[in-house]
Image (cartoon, grey):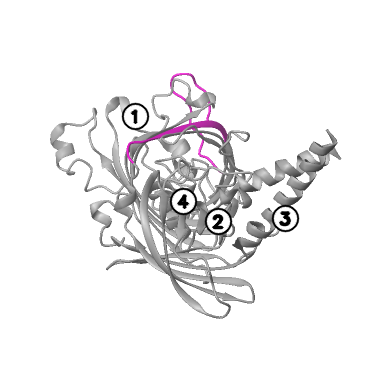
Amino acid sequence: MKKYLISCLVFVNFVYAQDDLLSLVDDRQEKQYVFATWKAYRLGNAQTTETVKKNHLEYRILHRFGNVADANKTLNQIAHTAFGLDVANDIRMSLEYGITNDITIALGRSRVNELVDLSAKWRFLKQTTDFKIPVSIALFSSMGYTTLSPDRLYANVAVKNFPTREAHRINYVTQVIIASKVNSWLSLELLPTWLHRNFIVQTFNPNTGREDGNDYPILGIAGRIKLSKRVTFFADYFYNFHPYFKDNPNVFMPLSVGFEIETGGHVFTLFFANNSAIVENNFLVSTTDTWSKAQIKFSFCISRTFSLKKE
Amino acid sequence: MRKYKLGLKFFSLFLICGNFLSNAQSIYIGKEKSTSIIFYSDAPLEKIEAKNTSATPVFNLSTGDFQIRVQMQAFQFKNDLMKEHFNENYVESDKYPYCTFKGKCNVTNFEEGKEQDVIMTGTMYLHGVSKLISVKGKIKKQNNELILFSEFFIRPADYNIKIPTMLTKKIAEEIKVTFNSILVPYTKK
């Protein structure tokens, strides 16, 4: 009885002392997911864990100019290309569509290798604000199909009457993207990647004699720093573990460094990179220029998102 | 000792009754899913509208206290990228997840079936900035429910929400807020 009375009193006092009416409302959310880990679907070369929102369509135009400088060429030669601005190393247009908030499918077409690529990104784990889940993880998979004419596709094949097959045109990229928004201005990610090409014209590393192969294990690393609310600075790098790449004077690891600027519905990406090709299926193995010889190219990307959501 | 106990009993009974009559009966709380807050930005290049239906206002008729807490991430936009930018760059909802208003209403007696003009005066807390505001609205009592309506303007600049110069043609300087809600007497769950 005594207990009952006391609890009554406590309850009464509680209600009386209630200046904060909002304690009657239970609207606190338990789990809060981190959002805006990255500004866009891609940084310079690396994919991000960002997806296109459900029923939204994104249109991206990427352009890669020519070398801004080149240690193998004279200044005059470079100046005649307006420091690379006259050259279109690669152009890519793509459409990305959000099936759900975490699954995006994309179709793109690049100039290099006349490659049409169909890809999907699925973010299956989302970071929470309390760091109980410290990372977001997405799976990215892409299939590339080159529409090159047979003469060009088999251009370097020495074998006579080489049997041609449709499967030779296809290559695959599979990537796990592990990202963390460390704090409001720093985001980092790791991208273990597997590239498979159905068909290669075999070459050798002139220094070590190692052959190249159909399969490449690659690790990407990327990060961004927010300079202001709408401007970020980022860098990404891909390291190829295949022995063919070790001490090879002909192929290099792609590195890109640049800025993202967000203006309402648009995100502009402006960056420099040593790789000529834009899409993973190409640049992960075909980068023949290097930062150490100043063979860097200016590149930009414009993206616009349209909502196809019904009211 | 016995006397004291008895006194305590009466006292608590009195408190409970008093409380029941004066407080519990006079507290009104938002009916489930009946509250909507819509903001509308009308700028030359872009019209932006967002709707929030997750908030629950509480109104104490015996004191005139009116309070509401609005979760910023619950505003829904037509374009979800806008929603992301709204949360990331404008209201910074990772730092300031809620907007609250705590004020007093100048009218506390409502006649059944009659709509009354009211003014609520109090503090709006948004994006880390507290500001004293006065908002005009209408309240109608019907079947022991209070139907609230209000339309007012807020200036993002007042709450330290900066709009970059290049976007001034896309985001209005004054944002129209439309508030609708139905309140029912509070019962403890």
Q: Say few, some or many: other residues with alpha carbon within 10 Å of mark 2 (under 14 / 14 to 19 / 20 or more).
A: many
Q: Nearer the viewer, residue A296 or B46?
A: B46
Instruction: Judge depth for marks 2 and 1 and give the one in front.
Output: 2
Image: B17 above or below A199: below
**Residue identifier under label 4:** B99
What are the residue bounds of the magenta stretch? A199-228
Image: B82 above or below A270: below
Circles 3, 1 touching at the beta carbon (< 8 Å): no
**Residue identifier under label 1:** A290
Residue A39 forms part of the magenta stretch: no
Instruction: Judge depth for marks 4 and 1 and give the one in front.
Output: 4
**Residue identifier under label 2:** A105
Residue type of the residue flagged with mark 2? Ile
- Subunit bearing disc 1: A
Visible in this render: residue A63?
no
- Looking at the image, tell me whether mark 4 or mark 3 is earlier in sequence order: 3
Whether discs 3 and 1 lie on one chain: the answer is: no
- Residue at the (38%, 50%) spot, across then down: B90
Report the side of A140 relative to A298 (left or right). Answer: right
Label 1: which secondary element: loop
**Residue identifier under label 3:** B17
In the image, farthest residue toward the front: B3
Circles 4, 2 touching at the beta carbon (< 8 Å): no
Q: Nearer the viewer, residue A96 or A114?
A: A96
Residue A214 forms part of the magenta stretch: yes
Kindly report the distance in space between the C-alpha atoms of the residues bearing marks 3 and 2: 63 Å
Whether discs 4 and 1 lie on one chain: the answer is: no
Q: Position of residue B83 (x, y in %)?
A: 46, 56
Q: Position of residue A22 (x, y in %)?
A: 57, 50
Q: Position of residue B12 (x, y in %)?
A: 74, 46
Q: Position of residue A289 (x, y in %)?
A: 34, 32
Kindly report the distance in space between the C-alpha atoms of the residues bearing marks 3 and 1: 83 Å
